[in-house]
Image (cartoon, helix red, strand yellow):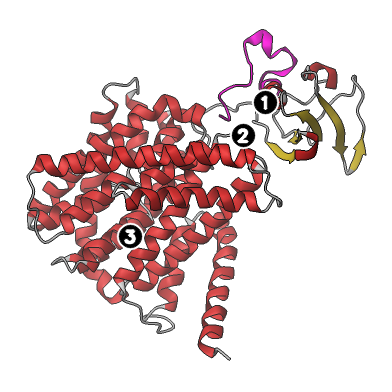
Amino acid sequence: MTPGLDLALLVGAAVLLVAVGAVRLSTRLGVPSLLVYLALGVAIGEAGLGIRFDDAELTRTLGFCALIVIIAEGGLTARWSTLRPVLGLAALLSTVGVVVSILVVGLAVHLLLGLDWRLALLYGAVLSSTDAAAVFATLRRLRLPPRLVATLEAESGMNDAPVVLLVVLLSREGITHPWWYETALVSYELGVGAAVGFAAGVGGRWALRHAALPSAGLYPIAAVGLTVFAYAAGAVLHASGFLAVYVAGVILGNARLPHRQAILGFADGLAWLAQIGLFVLLGLLVTPSRLGSAVLPAVVAGLALVLLARPLSVAASALPFRFGLREQAFLSWAGLRGAVPIVLATIPLSERVPGADRLFDSVFVLVVIFTLLQTGTLAPVARRLRVTALAEAAEIRVETAPLERMRADLLQVEVPPGSRLAGVHVDELRLPLGASVTLVLRDGAGVVPGPDFRLKTGDSLLIVATAGVRDEAERRLRAVSRRGRLARWFGEYGEDRDG
């Protein structure tokens, strides 16, 4: 009935399945998966299967949609306890650091490549944004101090907002307003965007905890829908929708929501789908025959970025904070670029800015080269700079399902390797009155535990807690998982790790 649609679905499903399989292959080979996705796009494009695609406007639109989902997932999985201490530095990196990076790269390519100031500053602006997808996917596999990881993740989630605004401003035919007006406009968009995200997050948190939805599958949809709503509300108010998404995601992700793990799993799956679609689309847009001439400007801009702009922006931003030279050096090297700069390069391309074709090609080449170079060397660089982290007690995950008619919650707790819940007797959990361990699943068999039942790694616990003591029970479980049966003796009360 619809042969065109059927063929499109066949090709799309095949590309998706190949991309999913390529994740495992890329992990084994040590090649970043985003490069595999870009290669897939090039392979099915005009230089491969012959599919011609050159719609920069559509790419920008779909790219923004993908970034909304990716940034939302980053916010939902960010821990407020590790994010809060580095929020000031991340904010400076996303503002002061961005300005320093734009000026340094712009000056370098203006002098070395002879580009006019507008195009030179566009190079700096497009390359100043670190990529949330690349940062989240890479850093969480490394053993690094939490504040370093939190700084880079928060920066990548926050710096998209000001960079998008600056790229749009520079892509206009001419800036007719004075500099102070443009500065006030950017400040308004960031401030209102953060406020909209905060309101959406707080309102959504209350609604999800009190809605009593009839199906568990509706909670993940509602949570992601709230982050998209935050973006749209911010955009309608001419504010930064990207910042609104991230703020709303952080608030929702750190709330004790029903079916929280299902929400995070759903968001993770959507983010993977968005990354795959985005990278394949960008690979499809590029013209391979033009990339050879883009190598020189890409290398010049990349060296200016890595050797000058990024270290200077980190140094300027970290000045008020206690970050040592080794940590600053790692922050400089770990400012990963991925799909975001390529998406941003479609903005001047769709606005038909002179030289935008070369800009897009150069950014594409730079992302490929530096993704291979940086992601493969992060672990050795971290060891060389001695910023690796020691192993810590594993954090437990608590899944919650509401029992509305009983006005209680059912908590599901796993005892992972490294958790100090292992070896603790049930009565040593000191759960509050109104909370009780009702079942332990061990080696596939269910056991109704007594007070002297000793937990071990791999156990799954089912705990029923009344609504009034649910939070206290979860805090106690988290405290014991980190410090063992003497948690309170060590001043550990299980707070601030998960909101």
Q: Secondary structure at mark 2?
A: loop
Q: Which residue is mark 3?
A: 343
Q: Quarter holding the N terminus?
A: bottom right
Q: Residue placed at 76% from the left, 33% from the top?
A: 407
Indicate which disc, 2 or 1, sits on the residue closer to the N terminus: 2
> Label 2 to label 1, Cα distance in Å?
8 Å
> Label 2 to label 3, Cα distance in Å?
34 Å
Per the rendered image, the range of residues in magenta is 479-499
Query: Would you place residue 184 above or below residue 474 in this image?
Result: below
Q: Which residue is mark 2?
A: 256
The amino acid sitting under disc 2 is Arg
Foreground pick, 367 / 407: 407
Q: Residues within 10 Å of mark 2 (few under 14, many from 20)?
A: some
The amino acid sitting under disc 1 is Asp
Q: Which residue is mark 1?
A: 471
Whether residues under marks 2 and 1 lie with C-beta atoms below 8 angstroms apart, the answer is yes
Q: Residue placed at 20% from the left, 61% from the top?
A: 296
Q: Residue placed at 78% from the left, 26% from the top?
A: 422
Indicate which disc, 2 or 3, sits on the residue closer to the N terminus: 2
Residue 196's x, y, as percent? 39, 41
Query: Would you place residue 305 above or below residue 22 in this image?
Result: above
Residue 176's x, y, as percent? 7, 53
Indicate which disc, 1 or 3, sits on the residue closer to the N terminus: 3
Residue 317's x, y, as percent? 27, 30
Q: Secondary structure at mark 3?
A: helix
In the drawing, does residue 211 fall left or right of residue 186?
A: right
Whether residues under marks 1 and 3 lie with C-beta atoms below 8 angstroms apart, the answer is no
The amino acid sitting under disc 3 is Val
